[in-house]
Structures are given as structure tokens and as C-alpha cells.
Amino acid sequence: MVALALDHGVNAIEIGAGNDASVRLLGDVLRRENAGNRVHVFARATSLVPFDLPSPHVPVDDAYPGRHLRAETEALLSTLGVERLALQQLHAWCPEWQHEGDWLETLDRLRAEGKIAGLGVSLFDHDVTAGFEIVASGLIDAVQAMYNIFDPAPAKTLFPLCQKHDVGVIARSALYYGALGGTLDFAPDDWRRVYFFDAHRHETGERVERLRAEVTPDRSVADTALRFSLSHPAVSTVAVGMRNRAQLEANLQAVLAGPLDADRRAALAGHAWLC
């Protein structure tokens, strides 16, 4: 599936730095396809301490000390077989971290050494305001945020700020963890089974059906949702999960269909509910 994506022109792949199996698989494919110099790899650094937000503040030196970021970045480069990462991101960003620790100094040095091209932060779920200060600071190159039909909040505040300060945007969860792609029945060991607790899963399913009633017969809900997330001019790319070739083909068709027009986006505004 990854090789097919590369053949069809996909040129950016996001990966969790701590997901060893995925990193090895991607490295194998990049070498086999001789594609290391034409794929932008976006990495999400692994926190050394597990935490969920909202939570008591976790010091950045506990989660992302500089020595850890360097070691993980260099290990990724070796396993992937690439000269540099396009982006190294701190996930579940806490605003306090901007003024703590040596993470920024370390990532700046890695960039100066040519081991990463840029640095960024990844915002936790709907926590848009957490990104305001760091985006306006000029210290980062990109921000990743949840942005979909159900949660379009970043378009009101975060995205204009990114455009003003020339910060790239990775739109995450375009399909709202699979719900907008038709998936709400999860395996027992899938983390989404807990995220979509009974009441939330029921309401999400009802809202997907309401949306389905407005989708044209020649398009799917997933197609509309992905094109929605691609439509905002601040969005550089969308991080969307794919588990098989059918999903890859469907996502590629949505990309080729292009952004939704202004009238269609306005009509979808009434489906916002998570922001």
C-alpha cells in the first residue's frame, strides 16, 4: 500500500517515532523504491512519560528532553535510510513548554546539522488555543491540529494566525478517527473503543447519518470530509490514516477531486459540534 501511494504521487508520510514496526516497514519500502529523496517524513517524537490531557502540567524535560529528541531523531534517520526528516514534532503540546527545557535548542541544532528540515508542534485533540503563542512566536515551522467537519474551530482562530506568521498546517483527524469514514465498530484492543464510549459513539453515528443525507449520490461521506479538510488555504497537507488499498484509492480520488467550493463548505457549517 505504501509503495502504491508513492507510485501515485503521495510525497509526505507522518509517523510516530516510537512505532518501531512502522518505522522499519517504511524504511524498507523507501529503500526498495529508492524513494528516500522524494518523500517528506513528518515524525512525532515519543514522550518519555505517558500523560493524557487535560492533566497536571508535565515538565517538558520529563517528556521531551533534548538528549532524547536527538537520540530518537538520529535513530529514525538510520532506520529510515534518509538524510533528514522533513519535520520533527512535539506531540500533545503544552503552552508552558515554550519557556522550558532544551528541546528548542536541540531541534534548532538538528536543523542546523541538516538532520531535520523543520520543527513543529502537534496539538492535543480540540485544544486549539494551546498553539496560539508558539505559532505567533516565529519559533516553529508547522503546527498539527484536529480539523474536520465536526470540529472546524481552527479555521476561526488558529489558521489565520498560521497564515500571518507563515506557519504550515497539518490537518489531523479529517475523518474524525474513522467515524466520518464509516467506522464506529472497533476491535476490543483498539484505543478508539474507549474514546467512543457508548453515548459518544451513538451521537457520532447519528450525526454521520445526518451528514450522509446531504452528500451527493456520487460522493461518500469520507470523500466530502477529506476534501473539506483540504479546502482551507492555510492547510498544507492532511494526515489521514489508511489501512488498505481501497482506502488509499478512495483518499486519492478525493484529493484529485479538489477542495470543496465556498457554498458547499458553508452548507456543512451546521454540522460543527465538537468545537
Image (tube, helix red, strand yellow):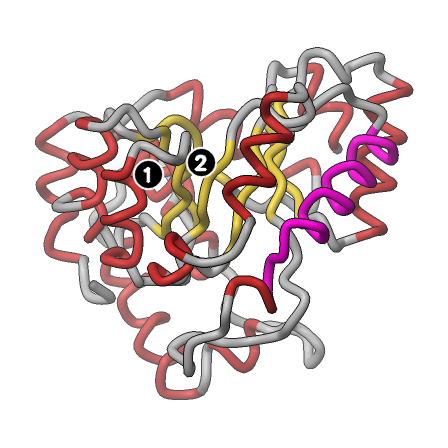
Q: Is residue 229 magenta?
A: no
Segment tinted magenta in the rendering: 63-80
Q: Report whether residue 197 is seen.
A: yes
Residue 210 higher or lower than 2, as above or below? below
Q: Secondary structure at mark 1?
A: helix
Is 75 colored magenta in this rendering?
yes
Disc 1 from disc 2: Cα separation:
7 Å
- Of the 4 image quadrants, the one containing the C terminus is bottom left
At 61% from the left and 23% from the top, the residue drawn is 40
Q: Nearer the viewer, residue 71 or 154?
A: 71
The picture places residue 50, in percent across and down from the top left corner, at 62, 74
Please indicate whether residue 57 sits to the left or right of residue 160 in the image: right
Which residue type does callout 2 highlight?
Answer: Val
Checking the image for residue 81, the label placed there is: none
* Quarter assignment of residue 254: top left
Tell me residue 132's x, y (percent). Answer: 23, 49
Residue at (16% x, 37% y) in the render: 265
Our reading of the magenta stretch's main secondary structure is helix
Q: Residue at x 59, y 25 (%)?
A: 111
* Mark drawn on residue 229: 1
Q: Which residue is mark 2?
A: 238
Q: Is residue 268 above or below residue 161?
A: below
Q: Is residue 192 above or below residue 243?
A: below
